[in-house]
Image (cartoon, grey):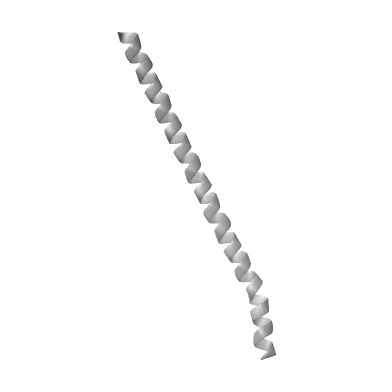
């Protein structure tokens, strides 16, 4: 019984560490995705402004 308890105790920090690592990876992926979305919306906004500007020049 003691052996099972001690091995469980030894294994638990590893699983916590793996969980923490997975959470960190998910968070990094989420941050990258948010950055890409921000860049995409920024370039879209820039293109839109450029289009409006060129259309105003043609009038």
Identify whether 45 is placed above or below 36: above
Identify whether 14 is placed above or below 23: below
Q: Residue at x 34, y 12 (%)?
A: 56
Q: Residue at x 50, y 49 (%)?
A: 30
Whether residue 2 sits left or right of residue 42 in the image: it is right
Residue 8: x %, y % from top left: 64, 80
Identify whether 10 is placed above or below 36: below
**Outermost residue to the left:** 59
**Outermost residue to the bottom:** 1
**Residue 42 falls in which quadrant of the image?**
top left
Count of numbered badges drawn on the protein: 0
Whether residue 21 sits left or right of residue 35 in the image: it is right
Residue 38: x %, y % from top left: 47, 37
Q: Residue at x 58, y 56 (%)?
A: 24
**Residue 58 falls in which quadrant of the image?**
top left
Residue 46: x %, y % from top left: 43, 25
Whether residue 18 sits left or right of residue 39 in the image: it is right
Residue 32: x %, y % from top left: 51, 45
Quadrant location, the C terminus: top left
Identify whether 22 is placed above or below 27: below
Quadrant location, the N terminus: bottom right
Q: Residue at x 47, y 40 (%)?
A: 36
């Amino acid at each position: 019984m003691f052996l099972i308890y001690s091995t469980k105790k030894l294994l638990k920090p590893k699983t916590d560490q793996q969980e923490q690592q997975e959470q960190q990876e998910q968070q990094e992926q989420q941050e990258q995705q948010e950055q890409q979305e921000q860049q995409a919306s920024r370039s879209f906004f820039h293109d839109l402004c450029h289009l409006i500007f060129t259309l105003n020049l043609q009038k």
